[in-house]
Image: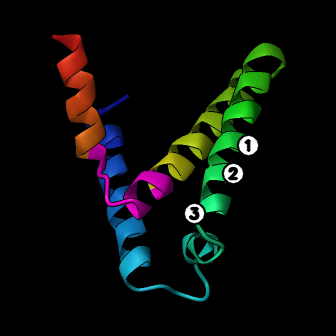
Amino acid sequence: MSQNSIDFLNTLEATILDRIESPSETSYTSRLLDQGAERVAQKVGEEGVELAIASLAGSDDEVTNEAADLIYHLLVLINSRGIRLADVCSTLEGRHR
């Protein structure tokens, strides 16, 4: 994975923040957020379960796709609460020390 791949998470987060601040009728993120916090949390749970199942019985491609879905929905959830990816990374860094 290149540094540019990791940097994409910042780009994705910026897009999610834009959808929070300026909803768009054509945006999945905006439609998801319009369904409320409970639905966003439900999607995180669904994607986590799908990733767990794929990790036991799926191909590497399935695991990769489910992990991407989980990361996306997790970013939507945390950003909808005003938490940024940098905040999560800081917590992880603090635990690593």
Residue highlighted by disc 1: 46
Instruction: Point out the stretch of residues depicted in magenta.
Output: 76-85
Characterize the magenta stretch by its predominant secondary structure: helix
Instruction: Name the side, left or right, on which 11 lies relative to 26.
Output: left
Q: Residue at x 27, y 24 (%)?
A: 92
Q: Nearer the viewer, residue 58 or 18?
A: 18
- Mark 2 surroundings: few (<14), some (14-19) or many (≥20) residues within 10 A: few
Instruction: Name the side, left or right, on which 94 lies relative to 35.
Output: left
* Residue 97 placement: quadrant: top left
Question: Above or below — where is 51 with respect to 42?
Answer: above
Residue highlighted by disc 3: 37
Instruction: Name the side, left or right, on which 82 lies relative to 20.
Output: left
Residue highlighted by disc 2: 42
What x and y, as percent, mark residue 26? 61, 85
Which of label 1 and label 2 is nearer to you? 2
Please report contact status of discs 1 and 2: CB closer than 8 Å, yes or no: yes
The amino acid sitting under disc 2 is Gln
Which of label 1 and label 3 is nearer to you? 3
Q: Nearer the viewer, residue 41 or 29?
A: 41
Residue 78 shown in magenta? yes
Q: Which disc number belongs to residue 23? A: none
* Residue 25 placement: quadrant: bottom right
Residue 67 shown in magenta? no
Q: Nearer the viewer, residue 62 or 70?
A: 70
* Residue 96 placement: quadrant: top left
Q: Is mark 1 on a helix, strand or loop?
A: helix
- Mark 3 surroundings: few (<14), some (14-19) or many (≥20) residues within 10 A: some
